[in-house]
Image (cartoon, helix red, strand yellow):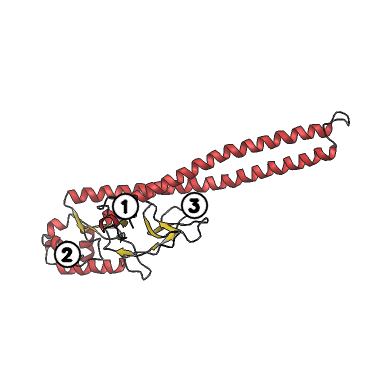
Amino acid sequence: MRIQAINTNTNFKGLFTDKTGQNNGNWRMEYSPYSWEKNSDGKIGQMANKAKFDVLTDKILPDNEEIFVRFSETPRAESSKDILGTESYFIRPDGRMRSTITEVPAMNREDSLKVLDQKYDRFLGMKDYLKRNLETNFDTLKNSADSASSDYNSHSAEHMKGMFERAYNKDQARRYMDQDKAALKNSTDKMYENAQKYIKLVNSMESVRNTKEKISKEINRLEELRKADKLIDISRQGIDNANAPLAEALQNIKAAAEKFICFPTKIVSMAEIMKMVNPRCIEGGYNNEIMRYVETLVRQII
């Protein structure tokens, strides 16, 4: 069966990637974790359990976010997608099911952040859509409240008229007034409820924008460091010889001292690490000590 994903570029480096089209039409869903992602056993660079998120209130996305749908009109049908729209699991109405996921090595930190940046862009888009809906609903509820208030005034005026002037008796007028009052309260209660949602949403959007800005800044920094040959990338810890780039860089200790090490979770200057090992590292002869210290840091991260 051929499944169409939102991102059909097979070079797309990120999490769920549909490779069905390159697998003779047979289902193949690959998952490349973030560099910092952990599985249920706490092992870094491994797929985390899927987790739902709340567009209204959440300020951060889970590493393996899920948009799960169970179709009420066809109880057997289910679908699980990520925020980018790639379907990783489904049950069709006829009972056909796909759930196998092929886990591949984790991305480095730079690629991980680029994917995360895309996801936060989509996350902000979802929040903005909800914000516009709430704003539209404010107008609708205000119109309903105005209408109920106007009706109440009209029925109240009718209630005050003399017997032969009224279009209906006082009991009917009182019933209408009670209905108008209930309608007015319902509209104002919903307006208050929506206002509370709106406040939470706007606050969460500000946090998401700040997070996205930090992600973008780090991506730019990593790109600049890489282009300037100032980056020692050991952020893919789930592969063989993950620390080999550091061992290679230490062959020229003076040049290495001006570089930065990219771990799965952060960037650290080599000068800072050398000072922690021995202030005289720059003189050379401390390669093994530096390697052991970095490996200790990696183990602490993991």
The local secondary structure at tag 1 comes to: helix
Using the rendered image of the protein, determine whether residue 45 is visible from the camera's viewpoint.
no
User: In this image, 19 relative to 88: left or right?
Assistant: left
Residue type at mark 2 is Ala
Q: Residue at x 15, y 64 (%)?
A: 247
Whether residue 173 appears in this view of the structure is yes
Nearest-to-viewer mark from 3 and 1: 1
Whole-percent x, y for residue 20 in the image:
30, 57
Task: Return the residue found at the far top.
Answer: 165
Identify the residue position indicated by label 1 in the image: 115
Residue 162, quarter of the rendered image: top right
Q: Earlier in the sequence, mark 2 or mark 3?
A: 3
Splitting the image into 4 quarters, where does residue 61 fall?
A: bottom left
Q: Residue furthest front?
A: 94
Of the 4 image quadrants, the one containing the C terminus is bottom left
Residue at the spot 11% in from the left edge and 67% down from the top edge:
285
| Amino acid, disc 1 | Val
- Total numbered circles: 3
Q: Which residue is mark 3?
A: 57
Q: CA distance from mark 3 to mark 1?
A: 22 Å
Q: Position of residue 276 (x, y in %)?
A: 23, 64
Identify which amino acid the numbered label 3 is placed on. Thr
Classify 139 as above or below 76.
above
